[in-house]
Image (cartoon, rainbow, N blue to C red):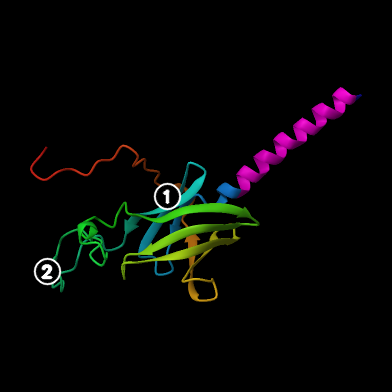
Amino acid sequence: MKRAVLVLLLTFLLLASFAVAADEDKILGLWNTPENDCKIEIFKSGGKYFGRIAWLKEPLYPAGDDGGMAGRPVVDRENPNPNLRSRPLIGLQFIEGFTYIGKNVWEKGTIYNPDNGKTYRCKMTLSAPNRLEVRGFIGIPLLGATSVWTRQAESSVVHRDYSGYRKPRMGVN
């Protein structure tokens, strides 16, 4: 009898752990920003959640660009660190270190805004299966702004592994 109870308890714990893992990974995938000008890939690494820019509607600077970069790939030129201003936005990891805390909420991470070069604390809430509320803030969530992202159709999801990527050096093939 004790053995049967132990087996049932272990089975329940195993199934419960799978359910929690399934809940916390519901955020994974490709997300559209509200203006549909950018697609964000959210991925998991080492138990934390991260995000990178996977696609831009306008991946090149337009003709007449004030920064003199017409026709070149869009870069992180607002970054406060001059050494990082030449990195391309496509592939840029700008969501860092989120932890699933339960009830479809991920916290304790940061989000970088390449439009102004600032990093904010952030909270993400999956309010519906295809609706992600991303709230960037300074100090407390009350002092922030929320952007609502929509999940990209699964058939269009492009998974990329950047773990072995090295930026090519100039003049080297």
Indicate left or right for 68 with 121 as reference. left
Residue 82 point in image, percent of width and height: 20, 62
Name the outermost residue toward the right: 1
What quarter of the picture does the N terminus occupy?
top right
Query: Marks 1/2: CA distance?
Result: 34 Å
Quarter of image, res 128: bottom right
Q: Secondary structure at mark 2?
A: loop
Mark nearest the camera among 1 and 2 is 2
Dot 2, crowdedness within 10 Å: few (<14), some or many (≥20)? few
Name the outermost residue toward the left: 171
Residue ID for mark 2 = 68
Name the outermost residue toward the bottom: 143
Residue ID for mark 1 = 156
The tag on residue 85 is: none
Q: Say what amino acid the circle numbered 2 marks.
A: Gly
Which region of the structure is painted magenta?
A: 2-23
Indicate left or right for 130 with 68 as reference. right
Residue depicted at x 76% and y 31%: 10
Residue depicted at x 39% and y 69%: 35
Verify whether residue 12 appears in magenta.
Answer: yes
Q: Secondary structure at mark 1?
A: helix
Verify whether residue 155 appears in magenta.
Answer: no
Main secondary structure of the magenta stretch = helix
